[in-house]
Amino acid sequence: MSIASNQSVKNIDVISVLPEMFKSLHFGVLGRALKNDLLRLTCWDARDYSVDKHRTVDDKPYGGGPGMVMMAKPLRKAIQHIQTQRDKPNWVVYLSPQGALLKQPGVVRLKEKLSTHNLVLLCGRYEGIDERLIESLVDEECSIGDYVLSGGEFAAMVLIDAMARLLPGVLGDETSAVDESFSRGLLEYPQYTRPENDEGARVPEVLLSGDHQAIARWRSRMALQRTLAKRPDLLGTAQLSAEEKKIDS
Ligand SMILES: C[S@@+](CC[C@H](N)C(=O)[O-])C[C@H]1O[C@@H](n2cnc3c(N)ncnc32)[C@H](O)[C@@H]1O
């Protein structure tokens, strides 16, 4: 486990009963970011903070009902232990279907938090976490969608991947994230690669023209068109350039 002392280090600490699941993050873009120390990910096993020899972290819900509930004490111990290992204050995010829905502006905001805080991602299991832990130590709750997962691990991985793409040096080309869907509230324009003719379907002529201004205009128009066709709800809040506003109206 790494102990950060450098203020510029971006730390994400995950608390989970299945920390092994996070091994899948050590591949591709994110894997390179971790290898190059652009981001530090430390996974803590909630069971290591259990108070009994059986490593129990859950118990029956008061009032009855199905399933088990994660106890406050082991999670509190884990969060407090992480704080002793870091120079920056913790910012604790509980991945929860009851949290605010994660969208790109939320990803950007949490990525920026990495400069001033250790992001502690708390993954629930079973029926969730004792409410008293949430009330006392969780800074925000974050949902990745209006559906219920078996645990917060996949949600945490989604958040980590989305944030990592925005960190300097993580993507090969720094403009990649700028044009991507949602960065300005629009979907991205369509992409094409070789061959020019794929079973009779040709790449739009403008992309072969070498005229960068014409290509930029075409891409703006296509981004608007496909946002209108696929996600018209986004257009109300999208940040449109003067040119795009003319196309939109
Ligand atoms: C089965 S769920 C518990 C659901 C809880 N009983 C409820 O109805 O709100 C177990 C854990 O999965 C995680 N989880 C489930 N759905 C999620 C979602 N949409 N976004 C983020 N985390 C989620 C949370 O950490 C949660 O504690």
Image (tube, helix red, strand yellow):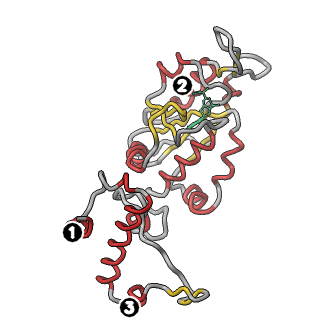
CA distance for labels 2 and 3: 59 Å
Kind of residue at disc 1: Lys
Question: On the image, numbered disc 3 is attached to which residue?
Answer: 209
Residue 64 is situated, as x and y percent measured from the top left of the image, at: 68, 11
- Up-down: is 207 above or below 188? below
Q: Nearer the viewer, residue 148 or 40?
A: 148
Give the position of the N terminus as an image quadrant: top right
Mark number, residue 64: none
Question: On the image, numbered disc 2 is attached to which residue?
Answer: 80
Secondary structure at badge 1 equals helix
**Ligand 1 closer than 8 Å to the CB at disc 2?**
no
Image quadrant where residue 37 sits: bottom right
Indicate the quadrant of ligand 1 in the picture: top right
Question: On the image, numbered disc 1 is attached to which residue?
Answer: 246
Q: Residues within 10 Å of mark 1 (few under 14, many from 20)?
A: few
> Residue at the location (64% across, 21% down)?
74
Residue 121 is situated, as x and y percent measured from the top left of the image, at: 54, 37
